[in-house]
Image (spheres, grey):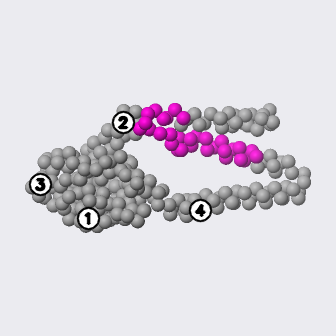
Amino acid sequence: AFRDRRKNPVGPLLLVWLALYPIASAPTYIAEHTATHALRAACGLPVFQWLAAIGLHAVLARFATQPRRRTAAIIASTFTIAANGIFVVHDYFARWARDPWIAALYQRDLRDALRAIRPIHRDYDRIYVSDQVNGRNQWFAGETYVYPLLVLPIDPALFHEWPKDVRYEHPTDAFHRVDSFGPFTLTTRTDVLERSFQDDPDHRALFIARPREIRGGRLIQTITGANGEIAFEIVAVTPSPRPPRARSSPRR
């Protein structure tokens, strides 16, 4: 890239870009609650594509006057590109799609639970979704509010009209947390349940709860996680004088 900098000044720019792009995500680790993320390095993706294209062009140009070597270079380049494409397809559709840990991180268990309540969720006044997290059990909860919108699905206009409880989980976070919106409450903390049932003791509630998290109610279905164990229990609670209680357990 530097060799042809007079003819093509883009080369040095790309190398400088290559050296500087990691800075975009490096300072994002502000406190123990935040972490760097691979997506923040996306601004470096074009660099690798351009460098690869420059390299391929240089190889072909070098053998431009030698037909046999040029043909060999084209064949080798085509094979390399095809091999990389095969690896990408395998990673996306075979390796990652079947990896239980990846499925847990993307909360496939929550997706399956929401699919299970599609036919019945309109029969209930409020839907509670557990926010318990346990890495050993592969229980995760992040940006939970997105899943009902996509899976049930919910009209985006309704989402904007419904009242919401939104906050920053930590003062240093750049991300907000939606604790509730419309008929959805995205936590099963005991204090939240007690307050909700005190405000409206006659409401019909549907819980997407962790195993044995909710005492009382009628078990409708269990949802198996990517690790083969029960990840969620779908529990219906009809109006009663006493609200259901969540079992106390660590959430982090």
Q: Position of residue 100 (x, y in %)?
A: 47, 60
Residue name at image x 67 percent, y 46 percent: 49
Residue name at image x 29 percent, y 54 percent: 129
Disc number at residue 120? 1
Disc number at residue 90? 4
Compare marks 1 and 2 and give the one earlier in the sequence: 1
**Quarter of the figure that contains the N terminus:** top right
Compare marks 3 and 2 and give the one earlier in the sequence: 2
| Secondary structure found at label 3 | loop
Q: Disc 2 marks which residue?
A: 170
User: Which amino acid type is shown beneath numbered disc 3?
Assistant: Arg
Q: Disc 3 marks which residue?
A: 242
Give the distance between the C-alpha atoms of the residues marked 4 and 3, in whole angstroms: 52 Å
Q: Is residue 78 visible?
A: yes
Residue name at image x 21 percent, y 62 percent: 236
User: Which amino acid type is shown beneath numbered disc 4?
Assistant: His
Residue name at image x 23 percent, y 53 percent: 247
Q: Is residue 28 magenta?
A: yes
Q: Nearer the viewer, residue 24 or 32?
A: 32
Depth check, mark 4 against mark 1: the one in front is: 4
Compare marks 3 and 1 and give the one earlier in the sequence: 1
Disc number at residue 128? none
Depth check, mark 3 against mark 1: the one in front is: 3
- Magenta stretch: give its range: 26-55
Give the distance between the C-alpha atoms of the residues marked 3 and 1, in whole angstroms: 23 Å
- Find residue 165 and report its image quarter: top left
Give the distance between the C-alpha atoms of the residues marked 4 and 1, in whole angstroms: 37 Å
* Residues at circles 4 and 1 in contact by the CB criterion of under 8 Å: no
Circle count:
4
Compare marks 4 and 3 and give the one earlier in the sequence: 4
| Secondary structure found at label 1 | loop
